[in-house]
Amino acid sequence: MAASIRLLARRIVRDAFRTINSSVSVRIVSSSCPSNLSACRCFSDGAADKSTHFGFETVSEGEKAERVYKVFESVAQKYDVMNDAMSLGVHRLWKDMLLHVMNPQPGIRLLDVAGGTGDISFRFLNYVRSQQERVARRTARANQTPSWQEISTSYMTPTEEIEMETEARESRAVVCDINKEMLKVGKQKAESMGVSSGLSWVVGDAEELPFDDDQFDVYTIAFGIRNVTHIDLALQEAVRVLKPGGRFMCLEFSKVTNPLLARLYDAYSFQMIPVLGEVIAGDWKSYQYLVESIRKFPDQETFKQMIEDAGLFSVRYHNLTGGVVALHSGFKL
Amino acid sequence: MAALLRGLRVGRALRGFGSVVFPKTSSPQCNGLRRGFHCAALRLQEDKDKSIPVPPSSTTTYHEHYQAHPFKNNTATYTQEAPAPEADAKEAPQPNTSYADQSGEQGEEYETEEQLQAHILNAALDFVQLHGWTLEAISAGAETLGLSAASSGMFQNGAGDLVLHFIAQCNAQLTEQMAEQHNQVQLGQAEPKKTAEFLRDAVETRLRMLTPYMDNWPQAMSILLLPHNIPDSLKHLSTLVDDIWYYAGDRSTDVSRPSQPKYPSPNVFLTPVHQAPHTIRPASAKLNWYTKRAALTGIYNTTELVMIQDSSEDFQDTWNFLENRIQDIVNMAGAAKQAASTGEAVAQGLLGAAVTLKNLTGINQRR
């Protein structure tokens, strides 16, 4: 009797381990192979395959993730060049504006989702570094005539403590993207620029981030959220990984307010951009998708509503270039 | 059997202790998602509830009941706040984006967000000596509350928000003190001060609130002078001066009122000998209202400037300067009154001389 009970117990334990292992392996597989993930999601959705938009086409949700992946896989090498050509260099100003509004203090942890080639992260590290230099310069100027108190405290505290303090305030940026090709291009850029410390590259899906709760001070997603299949899931994940008091910032193409400008913008988008795509990158369809996906994205007020529904407070947006791009910001309070 | 009864009694006592311990450990237990905000707000509630005195009473059941009450309060507020953020949160009137909402839930949430901002700014005041009136001070303040440093982005005006909040706080404190003094006078517990003395005390009290931040106050003043901050800083200054005059006894609002109130009298700087109510015309009463406030504004600003570069013991030079300026105003008011009455006397004398001349030349005679 005891023996059979022991056998039963062993079988139960083995089954439990097997299910745990299988779920872990599914997670590992899904985080490393996004195409498999889309297949898994199809399976989990069951028979009813919900449809969504891919540009002006209608596709199933599983298919959308796969096709977006293929789009960015093919444009990865020429991504930065095409950005400059399509926006006539203005995208740099938009990204600078994002950093200016963010105004990061030293020691902040940034999560750059859909960061791809790392534009935002590089700017973030530069900004924080220049701020630290400015503070150092200011303290050096102040220390030129130190008071008696300052001299005595500098003798009393060991130098290691001061060094440790400055190290603890180092800011870190994590670039997260679902697409390995984009991350590869980003890593090459980092190496060529000589940026190494404070930067890490992680493969992950915006709807299911591979991070713990309450990890980051700032979450940014620049020109990536319109490619996400379930925007509300991405917003919920953002709320999850942000620390209390953390900031969510989203830079995205949006509705142009001025009707004349809207007409010019539409003409430029549909006539010029796919042509540029074909000429420079040899890929008409990806840039056709890009332009169409912009039209499918909700406008400023609707997106602001979605952000508030996800649980963020103090949500505001700024229109850049007359509404071509909108910068939304919200706080997790 | 006796042992059983004893055990029951011990068990009841332990349960009582359990409920004493329980509220303390459960209130910090906050949902991971919205920890900071709720914890900040809960701390507010806890502070309010801690003021309920726990009686040193005897029976465990009474103790249980009393401890259960604040615990229930906490859960009540917690569950009340949990659905509020889930509801569609439309924000308070802010410059470019939001639209007002009429629902009661929204009203409560708005207040808590404003309160949270006020909390952060209060915490930031501790860091002003270290970082100055800057966003770094606000970030440091937010960090002490358990929020990330990035939450300083909530304050679009940055350091201006901090300075304006501090000024509003100081003005509110001063108004409270003046109201308290006024109450005491009404109750007859204190003597009413003379106007000049009252003004001097009010300005001194208000300026003494700046002493902890004196090293960085020039920076704060320069922030207040930035063009986008000028409307707000002027508004604060004008309400301050208005409040001080109100509590100094100036109740003049209507210029055409025929009867003069007994207390206060319209021209409060003069002794009753010089007052001549029937000669004060309505236009000059209004001018008087503006003159008083302009005078006090001038006194306040100049005294503040003197205080910044004052290095004497306990700012004694500043208070001497203040005393002298107020004395100047008193003298000037007296001199103006005297000039007016002299002018009238001269005018009457000339009129009399003219009538005498007419009599002498015979123009006035009836033919």
Image (cartoon, coloured by chain):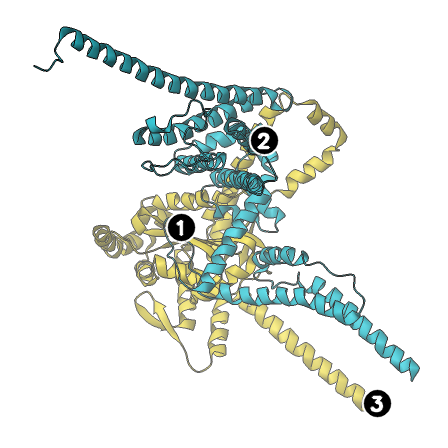
Chain colours: A yellow, B cyan
**Quadrant of the snapshot with the C terminus of chain B:** top left
Specify the label residue B82 is tagged with: none
Chain of the residue that carries numbered disc 1 in the rendered image: B
- Marked residue nearer the N-terminal end (1 or 2): 1
Relative depth, front residue between A98 and A76: A98
Q: In front here: A57 or B309?
A: B309
Residue type, numbered disc 3: Ala
Quadrant showing the N terminus of chain B: bottom right
Q: Is residue A232 above or below residue B182?
A: below
Q: Which mark is residue B94?
A: 1
Which residue is at the far left?
Answer: B367
Tag 2 subunit: B
Which of discs 3 and 1 lies nearer the camera? The answer is 1
Mark 1 Cα shell of 10 Å, populated few (<14), some (14-19), many (≥20) = few
| Tag 2 residue | B208
The reply, left or right, for residue A269 in relation to residue A64 is: left
In three-dimensional space, the C-alpha distance between marks 2 and 3, rounded to whole angstroms, equals: 84 Å
Res A302 → quadrant = bottom left
CA gap between label 3 and label 1 equals 72 Å
Secondary structure type for disc 1: loop
Q: Position of residue B55 (x, y in %)?
A: 75, 61
Q: Is residue B217 visible?
A: yes
Residue A106: name its quadrant.
top right
Give the alpha-carbon distance from disc 1 to disc 2, as whole Å: 33 Å
On screen, B112 above or below A123?
A: below
The lab-note entry on whether marks 2 and 3 share a chain reads no
Q: Type of residue at label 1?
A: Gln
The residue identified by callout 3 is A2
